[in-house]
Image (cartoon, rainbow, N blue to C red):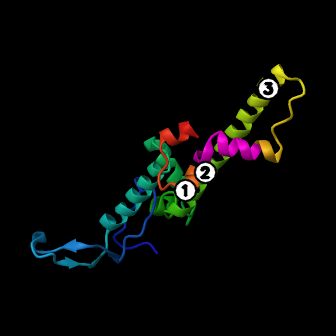
Amino acid sequence: KLAGFSSRGEGVDIAAPGVGVVQQTICDHGRNKCELFPAYSGTSMASPHVAGAAALMVGLGISDPAAVERALRKNARSVDDSDQGKKLYGAGILDVGKAASEITKTHVFVRLLAFVAFALLAWKGARKKNKDALHPFRPSFLLAGLIAGPGLFFFAPWILPRVDLAVDILA
């Protein structure tokens, strides 16, 4: 439900939780290790949700700010697609889980496509030297290719908490 204090108008890009958000607060300027966990409301509580989601997108390998925004907007949960609804919710309600899932699926698809392309290139090269070379799409070749070729780097997106360009290049 949209809060009464929520921003409205053409400038709204996406909606995020902003009512009753628990925040860790250090009291007494941190001198006595005093910590409070009050709940605050406001657009200042909603914006960190979006910033955190954007940081997760960057952690998943999207480095272009416009691409991060597109990923978040594209995967937002639609509330009201009318012109009036877009002025209230923008693209919809932030759904970082869906965005992360879509990004990961894309990365997996691209990696599998690259693996198949390189397997075909390897087969083509082998066929130039030996016309009787077997095709690469048999279990022994695929397993050896995954283990000895890119090694476990192929599985890096599922194993590592953050995937860098270096891991992508090695994969």
Looking at the picture, tell me which residue is in the foreground, 148 or 14.
Answer: 148
Amino acid type, callout 3: Ala
Q: Which mark is residue 45?
A: none
Question: For numbered disc 3, what is the local secondary structure?
Answer: helix
Rendered residue at 79%/45% (across/down): 140
Rendered residue at 38%/56% (across/down): 51
Quick one: label 2 or label 3, which is nearer the N terminus? 3
**Crowdedness near tag 2: few (<14), some (14–19) or many (≥20) residues, C-alpha within 10 Å:** some
State the image quarter where residue 110 is shown. Answer: top right
Q: Find out whether residue 29 is within the magenta segment.
A: no
Question: For numbered disc 1, what is the local secondary structure?
Answer: helix
Q: Can residue 102 be seen in this view?
A: yes
Residue with the mark numbered 3: 126
Q: Nearer the viewer, mark 1 or mark 3?
A: 3
Q: What stretch is highlighted in magenta?
A: 142-154
Quick one: label 1 or label 3, which is nearer the N terminus? 3
**Crowdedness near tag 1: few (<14), some (14–19) or many (≥20) residues, C-alpha within 10 Å:** few
Inter-mark Cα distance, 2 to 1: 6 Å
Q: Which mark is residue 159?
A: 1
The x and y percentages for residue 64 are: 45, 40
Rendered residue at 58%/58% (across/down): 101
Q: Find out whether residue 150 is within the magenta segment.
A: yes
Q: Main secondary structure of the magenta part?
A: helix
Inter-mark Cα distance, 2 to 3: 26 Å
- Rendered position, 4 above or below 105: below
The x and y percentages for residue 119 are: 74, 35
The x and y percentages for residue 164 are: 47, 44
Residue with the mark numbered 2: 155
Looking at this rendering, what residue extends furthest in the top direction? 128
Amino acid type, callout 2: Phe
